């Protein structure tokens, strides 16, 4: 069996936008929903992580139950902005198969406005799938400003859906699966796929 992780972006997207997820306290989520983008008390001066995988967000937030993560937002971004983030990224961890040297990676990391991390995708029961990887994208303050002011088109509150799926995982897995967003492989050109170490 091939032990190599399968690094592929899977997301809900259309011709112009792609959906990512974040989870926050209501104090941040409610103003963002009202404004259609992030506003105070959201901070532009710290790194923020966006995730295209609904199930990875479910895992990270404990189905929207962890303190500070009780409201799960689906943020629709311009695909042009999302791809800018990928093109200006570097992996958050050194990978000898991907980088010329550890020093070269450290130099790039120090100047990159975006970080990429590949983590095990999750099942409906929030068990890791070691052979299937899900992307997380860390935006530095430079990239966060683009994210907030230029890329976001709409924000939805998907907390009720997340709670419903969680309830159904205990009683009817097939029905729970029917509520999941229709995530599919996101198209990347060869150069961009290689840049983020997708497979």
Image: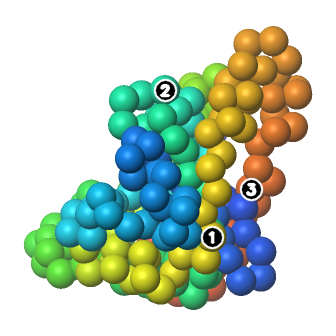
Nearer-the-camera pick, 192 or 141: 141
Q: Residue at x 42, y 28 (%)?
A: 66
Disc 1: which residue = 154
For the C terminus, give its image quadrant: bottom right
Query: Which dot, 3 or 1, sits closer to the camera?
Result: 1
Mark 1 / mark 2, whichever is N-terminal:
2
Mark 3 / mark 1, whichever is N-terminal:
1
Q: Residue at x 56, y 30 (%)?
A: 63
Against 141, residue 69 (above or below) is above
Residue 59, position in %: x, y?
51, 33
Mark 2, Cα crowd under 10 Å, few <14 / some 14-19 / many 20+, is: some
Residue 6, position in %: x, y?
58, 53
Against 165, residue 24 (above or below) is below
Residue 40, position in %: x, y?
32, 63
Against 105, residue 123 (above or below) is above
Disc 3: which residue = 183
Q: Residue at x 55, y 69 (%)?
A: 36
Q: Are marks 1 and 2 in contact (CB under 8 Å)?
A: no
Q: Is residue 39 left or right of residue 17?
A: left
Against 84, residue 100 (above or below) is above
| Label 3 to label 1: alpha-carbon separation | 18 Å
């Amino acid at each position: 069996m091939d032990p190599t992780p399968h690094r592929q972006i899977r997301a809900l997207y259309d011709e112009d936008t792609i959906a990512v997820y974040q989870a926050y306290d209501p104090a941040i989520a409610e103003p963002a929903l009202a404004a259609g983008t992030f506003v105070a008390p959201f901070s532009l001066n710290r790194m923020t992580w966006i995730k295209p995988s609904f199930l990875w967000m479910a895992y990270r937030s404990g189905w929207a139950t962890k303190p500070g993560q009780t409201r799960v937002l689906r943020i629709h971004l311009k695909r042009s902005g999302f791809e800018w983030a990928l093109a200006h990224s570097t992996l958050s961890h050194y990978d000898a198969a991907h980088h010329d040297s550890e020093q070269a990676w450290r130099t790039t990391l120090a100047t990159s406005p975006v970080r990429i991390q590949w983590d095990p995708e999750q099942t409906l029961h929030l068990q890791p799938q070691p052979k299937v990887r899900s992307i997380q994208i860390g935006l530095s303050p430079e990239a966060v400003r683009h994210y907030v002011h230029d890329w976001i088109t709409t924000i939805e509150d998907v907390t009720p859906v997340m709670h419903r799926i969680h309830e159904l995982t205990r009683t009817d897995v097939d029905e729970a699966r029917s509520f999941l967003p229709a995530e599919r492989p996101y198209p990347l050109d060869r150069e961009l796929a290689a840049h983020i170490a997708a497979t």
